[in-house]
Image (spheres, helix red, strand yellow):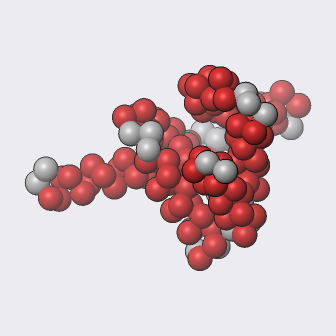
């Protein structure tokens, strides 16, 4: 077995132990792609995978609007209460951080390794939940800028 496959098997095991089915499933899919000699699709998955993931995430978030679970009064209430305003601000800050994370991942795709290992660490030892590499990259981008600022670089 080659190094790539061994790493994927390791990620499957870590994902299972760390209660992260998304990591385990993603590693399984990629391992299947490799073992079925479909590696020609890996560049497309790499290039478009994040966009597809964001599309499905956005779809799942918008379902309450499409299904009618969120009515106009709830939408208006978001602008009339402190919790509503805090949620709007939180959403805007999260979107900004995700954009910075995406920029960072584009500059240094190898950073994903650290993000995955850090996420697994957080899941296992801090009882966290996996939110994906984009938010982790956004936080990393902000920490990186703070570190550069504090170190004078």
> Can you name the residue that lies furthest to the left here?
152
Identify which residue is drawn at 71% across, 63% down. Answer: 13
Identify which residue is drawn at 61% across, 54% down. Answer: 7
Tell me where residue 40 sits by quadrant: top right
Q: Is residue 1 visible?
A: yes
Viewer-closest of 51 and 26: 26
Picture coordinates of residue 57 (x, y %)?
70, 36
Viewer-closest of 70 and 32: 32
Viewer-closest of 100 and 80: 100
Q: Is residue 128 visible?
A: no
Q: Is residue 60 left or right of residue 144?
A: right
Picture coordinates of residue 151 (x, y %)?
15, 58
> Can you name the residue that lies furthest to the front here?
1
Question: Is 61 placed above or below 3 here?
Answer: above
Identify which residue is drawn at 63% across, 67% down. Answer: 123
Picture coordinates of residue 126 (x, y %)?
58, 74
Tell me where residue 128 sits by quadrant: bottom right
Picture coordinates of residue 146 (x, y %)?
26, 54
Q: How many marks?
A: 0
> Can you name the residue that lies furthest to the bottom here?
125
Tell me where residue 59 sits by quadrant: top right
Q: Is residue 9 left or right of residue 146?
A: right
Q: Is residue 62 left or right of residue 104?
A: right
């Amino acid at each position: 077995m080659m190094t790539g496959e061994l790493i994927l098997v390791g990620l499957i095991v870590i994902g299972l132990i760390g209660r992260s089915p998304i990591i385990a499933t993603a590693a399984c899919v990629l391992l299947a792609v490799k073992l079925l000699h479909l590696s020609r699709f890996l560049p497309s998955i790499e290039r478009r995978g994040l966009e597809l993931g964001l599309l499905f995430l956005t779809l799942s978030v918008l379902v309450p609007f499409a299904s009618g679970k969120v009515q106009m009064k709830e939408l208006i209430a978001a602008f009339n209460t402190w919790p509503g305003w805090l949620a709007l601000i939180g959403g805007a800050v999260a979107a900004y951080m995700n954009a910075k994370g995406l920029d960072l991942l584009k500059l240094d795709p190898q950073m994903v390794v650290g993000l995955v290992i850090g996420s697994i660490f957080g899941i296992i030892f801090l009882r966290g939940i996996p939110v994906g590499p984009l938010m982790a990259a956004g936080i990393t981008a902000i920490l990186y800028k703070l570190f550069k600022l504090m170190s004078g670089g």
